[in-house]
Image (spheres, rainbow, N blue to C red):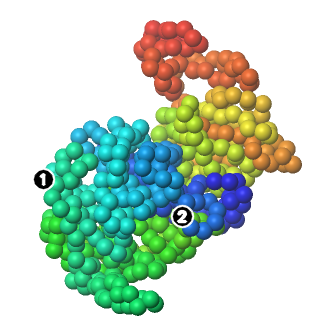
């Protein structure tokens, strides 16, 4: 996203962010159509990406964000694009859905006006291949918004549709289906709306869906207990969220009512509902980032609790979003700089050598990371992997507020990626929020200060000796012990280590 689009951020997020706001959960670009997938200890959130300027949808890529705590979101970058489909064209990367099965990952991707394709990957990030080299579903121009649900008996179902709702039973391969395409009737009983005939301005007979809560698009199917749920965008323009329930994945469905009102700033919305670490969450999008609109949307999330009978309550949209983490961040493991709870003025970049990192950081930009657990003994120093971009600058590491600076790391003159170190001016123990503030050495040269890849802290009880070694094209870097697979060791014990280009057995002295 171009930097000039972030001029909004300082005023907006300083006002809202410090009051505890978490929504929208992604502030570095416009995202829409959230599709959440829980796998192991991680929630994977796939999104479409809206255009940065102008009106209309210019959509070519799909993005992935992950979390283990529901308050910090790691940008995993662009994980798939229209280029993965030889038949896709140059626009139309709409709402995706991704599911794992039998050691593989399957991305169901709607290509506007061309049908629904499927990609197969070996990991949540791909790389992907298109086994069909054609659309899996291509029977109607309304073939969009796929959602896949795998029942307890192993049968997988694919649902989709705009102003029409269809499903098929997928084969075990997940790239084909058995039987015919089945249509779910859109009636007041099933989804709160019904079809009626009318004549358009040319006198041609047409069919339209009417009713206060009529189904529109974006189905999301899942099972909880013995009940099946179908949550969807409803009501026409502007959309809101409603849902139906059934005793079977094939229906009959019974309309249950509205669960979320129309979002601010967007005429569409899109649901995703999951349970994660014992709590229930609903994702949606609105247009609340500055410059947002129905064509520049932003993903949000709310926590909720089901009613005692399994029905879904009305869920208000909030700026606060999810404030209570379900896990804590370890400061003693390498953490990506693009793991963000809240950011101002920040954007990310991506390349093959380093993956995703923070780019083009300017004076006044900052990143907040929530719920970092330093433990009882606490940390004694911090390590940041950075490099200068155009102008001199430094990073202030703050605890709990931007006024509580505990370390400063000067990035001036660092021409290549390197770890820089700084001792903390106080012992930090317990659970805290961390701020990384980006500052200019010369306030007349405020922009394009640095790039930031990762960070970690060293505890007071760390053993081993670290040395400062020269790095070509930069100031002295900080080089510590690594294991034989090349991983940085923050807390070395006894073992075999590589340090300073030499192998050590025992502790790396």
Disc 1, disc 2: CB below 8 Å? no
| Image spot of residue 247 (x, y percent) | 14, 69
**Vertical relation: 246 (above or below) 213:** above
Could you tell me if residue 300 is visible in this image? yes
Q: State the residue at coordinates (84%, 46%).
A: 445
Q: Residue at x 72, y 60 (%)?
A: 7
Q: In which quarter of the image is residue 442?
A: top right
Q: Residue at x 59, y 54 (%)?
A: 28
Res. 39 in view: no
Q: In this view, does 7 lie to the left or right of 148?
A: right
Closest to the camera, between mark 1 and mark 2, is: 2
Circle nearer the N terminus (1, 2) = 2
Which of 305/147 is in front?
A: 147
Label 2 neighbour load within 10 Å: few <14, some 14-19, many 20+: some
Bin the neighbour count of mark 1 within 10 Å (Cα to Cα): few under 14, some 14-19, many 20 and up.
Answer: few
Find the residue positioned furthest to the right. 444
Residue 283 quadrant: bottom left
Q: In this view, does 134 lie above or below 217?
A: above
- For the residues marked 1 and 2, what is the alpha-carbon distance in whole angstroms? 39 Å
Q: Residue 448: horizontal and vertical position, in percent? A: 75, 44
Q: Position of residue 472 (x, y in %)?
A: 71, 19
Residue 27: x and y in percent read 57, 57
Q: Mark 2 points at which residue?
A: 57
Residue at the disc numbered 1: 153
Identified at 73% across, 35% down, the residue is 388
Q: Which of 24 and 221 is in front in this view?
A: 221
What secondary structure is found at the residue carrying circle 1? loop
């Amino acid at each position: 996203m171009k930097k000039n689009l972030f001029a909004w951020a300082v005023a907006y997020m300083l006002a809202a962010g410090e009051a505890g706001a978490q929504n929208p959960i992604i502030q570095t670009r416009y995202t829409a159509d959230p599709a959440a997938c829980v796998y192991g200890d991680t929630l994977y959130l796939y999104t479409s990406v809206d255009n940065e300027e102008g009106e209309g949808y210019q959509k070519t890529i799909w993005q992935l964000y992950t979390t283990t705590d529901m308050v910090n979101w790691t940008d995993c970058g662009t994980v798939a694009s229209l280029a993965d489909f030889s038949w896709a064209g140059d626009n139309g990367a709409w709402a995706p859905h991704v599911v794992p099965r039998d050691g593989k990952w399957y991305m169901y991707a709607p290509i506007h006006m061309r049908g629904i394709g499927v990609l197969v990957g070996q990991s949540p990030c791909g790389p992907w291949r298109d086994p069909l080299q054609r659309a899996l579903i291509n029977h109607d121009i309304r073939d969009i918004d796929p959602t896949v649900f795998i029942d307890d008996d192993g049968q997988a179902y694919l649902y989709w549709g705009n102003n029409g709702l269809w499903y098929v039973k997928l084969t075990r391969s997940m790239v084909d289906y058995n039987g015919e395409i089945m249509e779910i009737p859109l009636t007041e009983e099933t989804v709160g709306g019904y079809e009626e005939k009318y004549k358009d301005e040319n006198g041609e007979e047409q069919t339209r869906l009417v009713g206060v809560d009529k189904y529109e698009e974006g189905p999301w199917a899942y099972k909880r207990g013995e009940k099946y749920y179908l949550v969807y965008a409803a009501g026409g323009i502007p959309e809101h969220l409603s849902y139906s329930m059934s005793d079977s994945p094939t229906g009959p469905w019974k309309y249950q009512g509205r669960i979320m009102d129309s979002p601010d700033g967007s005429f569409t919305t899109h649901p995703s509902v999951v349970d994660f670490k014992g709590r229930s969450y609903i994702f949606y999008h609105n247009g609340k980032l500055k410059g947002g609109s129905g064509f520049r949307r932003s993903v949000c999330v709310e926590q909720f609790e089901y009613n005692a009978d399994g029905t879904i309550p009305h869920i208000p949209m909030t700026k606060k979003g999810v404030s209570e983490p379900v896990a804590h961040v370890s400061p003693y493991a390498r953490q990506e700089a693009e793991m963000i709870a809240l950011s101002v003025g920040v954007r990310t970049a991506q390349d093959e050598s380093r993956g995703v990192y923070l780019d083009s950081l300017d004076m006044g930009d900052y990143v907040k990371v929530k719920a970092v657990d330093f433990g009882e003994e606490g940390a004694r120093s911090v390590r940041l992997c950075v490099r200068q971009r155009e102008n001199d600058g430094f990073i202030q590491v703050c605890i709990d507020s931007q006024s509580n600076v505990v370390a400063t790391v000067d990035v001036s003159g660092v021409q290549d990626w390197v770890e820089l170190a700084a001792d903390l001016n106080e012992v930090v123990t317990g659970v805290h929020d961390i701020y990384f503030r980006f500052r200019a050495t010369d306030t007349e040269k405020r922009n394009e200060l640095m790039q930031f890849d990762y960070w970690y802290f060293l505890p007071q009880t760390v053993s081993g000796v670290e040395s400062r070694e020269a790095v070509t094209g930069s100031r002295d870097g900080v080089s510590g012990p690594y294991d034989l697979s090349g991983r940085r060791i923050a807390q070395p014990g006894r073992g075999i280590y590589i340090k300073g280009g030499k192998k050590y057995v025992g502790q790396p002295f």
